[in-house]
Amino acid sequence: MNGPGGTPARRLVVLRHAKSAWPEGVPDHERPLAPRGLRDAPAAGSALAGAGRVPDLALCSTAARARGTWELAAAEWDAPAPVRFDPRLYGADVPGILEVVHETPAEVGTLLLVGHNPGLEELVLALAGDGPDGALDQVRLKFPTSAIAVLSWHGPGWRSLTPGAAVLTSLTVPRGRKPQDG
């Protein structure tokens, strides 16, 4: 699907890492997923597959909780996308995240970004010029763990993604099923 001037439609899928644990003595970068995160990350992968949002490429923070989220989400797809683990995404602000995103090859139509708050929440708010009723308000209120924001825009390449250029087309927060008691 092409937009104005024949520019292709592009999609940035922003996935905040799943819920992490806080083990004593473990550096922040190495914190693993908590039990809820171990349930929610596969649910995020299933949600992406069910919505036809499996990416052509994934960019993922090098933090353990982001890598774990990526691995569990991608395991839900028939054919996981290639992934690039980029240390610049750990703790990055909007300009830093955009620097990494702008390096994406032009042939990538759907890009998945797996990272952290507050950077991801701020990125979604900066990029989205519009969105479904209440979705931007929900992001402003909270962009929880495992949240998935999908931003679309028309552009010749990823360098054309700038603040206000995209539309927030969906926001979901998939949750995995808790084990049954008994």
Image (cartoon, rainbow, N blue to C red):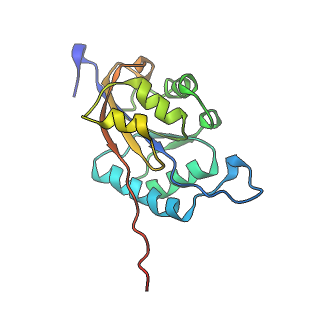
Residue 78 seen in this snapshot: no
* Front position in the image: 60 or 139: 139
Residue 106 seen in this snapshot: yes
Q: Residue at x 44, y 75 (%)?
A: 179
Which residue is farthest right?
25
Tell me the quadrant of the picture where the C terminus can be found.
bottom left
Q: Is residue 179 left or right of residue 21?
A: left
Picture quarter containing residue 89? top right
Relative height, residue 38 to residue 88 (above, below): below
Relative height, residue 104 to residue 73 (above, below): above
Q: Residue at x 46, y 63 (%)?
A: 39
Q: Position of residue 4 (x, y in %)?
A: 22, 15
Which residue is farthest top?
5
Q: Is residue 82 left or right of residue 170?
A: right
Picture quarter containing residue 166? top left
* Front position in the image: 111 or 95: 95
Q: Position of residue 15 (x, y in %)?
A: 45, 43
Q: Residue at x 63, y 51 (%)?
A: 64
Q: Residue at x 40, y 37 (%)?
A: 139
